[in-house]
Amino acid sequence: MMGKRLKKSRYISGFDGVRTLAVIGVILYHLFPYRMTGGFLGVPIFFVVSGYLITDLLIQEYEQNQQIDIKAFYVRRMKRLYPALMTMVLTTSAFVTLFARESIDKLRGVIVSNIFYVYNWFQVSNHESYFDKFGNQSPFTHLWSLSIEGQFYLIWPLVILIMLKLIRSRQTNFDILLVAAFVSALLMIILFKPGQDPSRIYYGTDTRMFSIVLGAALAFLWPSTKLKANLQQGPRLFLDGTGLVSLLLIVWMFFKMDGESDLVYLGGMFFFSILSALLVATIVHPGADMNRLMTNKFFTWLGKRSYGIYLYQYPIMIFYEQKIANVANHPWLHAVIEIALILLVSDLSYRFLERPMQHFDYKQTFTVLKEVFTKGSAAGPKRVWLGLATVVVLIAGWGALDKPRASVSQRDSQDLQKVISQNNKQAKKQNAEPQKKKTVAKKAPDNKPAKSTEKTTETAEGELTKSQVAQAKKMPVTAIGDSVLADASATMQGIFPQMYVDAKVGRQVRDALPILTSLAQNGKMSDTVLLSLGTNGPFTPDDLKQIMQVLGPQRKVYWVNTEVPTQRWQDQVNQDLAKAEKKYHNLTVIDWHSYSQKHPEWFYSDNVHPNPDGLPYYGNFVAKSMLNKS
């Protein structure tokens, strides 16, 4: 294993169970991010396990051989991890180039940064959000963690060798690593800014290293080959109890923690990593029963394929859901199909790529290539594989060098914010000169001018009456929303000239709370409030309660529900809004979902944002719903 084969090294089968637990959490989080809200915590479990196993094996090698063969360590890690990673990156890049060109942006940087295991810092430098679950998601988002592990594998043999040569005491080395873990966790706390996207500290090596370091520290204090197999009943029960409590708390936190909650970054993730280290410790100990509990054929099968499952899950989910327009109608059915595809691809990768390449002698590469080109039909299968690999690399390279093309499904948030700002200025002028009739034209995302709102309100289905038009012109409205309202801002402000709009691409429901609070405290909130939120994810009852408390019972609140058939949370959002309407007497839900469901021609190809033909219907329907209730 390490240098000369380690004499006392143990294979701990329960680690496959731990990996299974981690990868199930991650997959369910990506499939149902608003149900399995803490599934992202599967990654710290992987980090703790890696930290423990690698450090434990390096210490064993040093104690047996009085040295660590660092070159051999790098070769083993590369042979184990690199072939599957590069296969996934290049095949996904080729697929993006051919079939998903809207995702081609920054493809060159994605490929290069993954080759050198610095993709997490590439994400930080490009301000990519891990928690934006809508829009043009990158199929590479999840690879940040593999870059952190790659950086760990690069420096850790050197760190361990220095520590073992300079410091003989295991306790002292444990203390040093424990302090290092605390420093990393403290850095996460210091850099965290409430109310801001936490992706910087989520991706950062410096702010995430504590999970790996905790596992490494455990290896000094809890070496797998020096633990006694025979324990008295008291200590054994204590270990089993600790393991079970840790396991139950981990599962509970999978369901209860939220990646955008302040608690996660103010010590919650560090506490979770400690729980993971405790679980690892009880599984490692041969005198406890946790290893047997976490060992079975199912866990072994999944655990051995967990690396491939983690690698391939995200691109499979994203590409599958891009081609399915009605995920929201059958979310569990599509989830089962996606899981089946992930397991199939991962199993094929494990059998025909990961295991063969792990044991392949790369010194024979030239000999193999020579056989491919010189031998006859016997080399046929190898020629096919080499040909496919060459085609994939060439297509991926083409995509990396090509410039991304504009797509109607993409939203330029900066342009939208400019439109909204211009329209808000227009609304202020209308407030000052209420007798003047003005028409606001909006530049549609395909660069064609939208139809005049004044004109469409006279001709579109469900047109406003003259009295409603006059009523709308006199009604001050505060509108807060996401990209759907941003797209419709010109249309809405054409109908309601005194409407103030604050809309932003990617906005979550909870993001509206500080905006509403500021407007209310500064006396800038109208008596009529329009909310268009939920496109980017659902909300908790507490989110809604806080929003309604800020708005107060005296204001009339109108909330446009969601038509987002490509996302699983559509029905959850709409059902929660329907329940809220019964609870809050001043809340009216505008059922855009039911009204628009049978009119796909009203939407862009994303099936979410109304196009120039659909905007008049959106504007008239929302306006009539508000005016009929006023």
Image (cartoon, grey):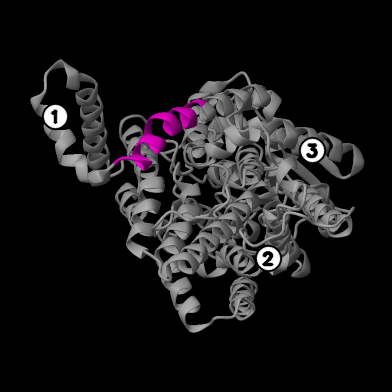
Task: Return the residue nearer the eye: 333 or 233.
Answer: 233
Residue 223 position by quadrant: bottom right
Q: Residue at x 65, y 73 (%)?
A: 189
Task: Return the residue nearer the eye: 442 or 35.
Answer: 35
Q: Quadrant of the C terminus?
A: top right
Q: Position of residue 11 (x, y in %)?
A: 57, 47
The dominant secondary structure in magenta is helix
Q: Which residue is mark 3?
A: 577
> How far apart are labels 1 and 3 at the CA level?
66 Å
**Residue 270: which numbered mark, if any?**
2
Q: Which residue is mark 1?
A: 371
Above or below, 483 relative to 514: above
User: Under tag 3, what secondary structure?
Assistant: helix
Name the kind of residue labelled 3 in the image: Leu
Read off the magenta span.
344-360
> How far apart are labels 2 and 3 at the CA level?
35 Å
> Would you say residue 251 is visible in this rendering?
yes
Name the kind of residue labelled 1 in the image: Glu
Which of disc 2 and disc 1 is earlier in sequence? Answer: 2
> Would you say residue 612 is visible in this rendering?
no
Say few, some or many: other residues with alpha carbon within 10 Å of mark 2 (under 14 / 14 to 19 / 20 or more): many
Q: Mark 1 or mark 2, which is nearer to you?
A: 1
> How far apart are labels 1 and 2 at the CA level?
53 Å
Tell whether position 465 is magenta: no
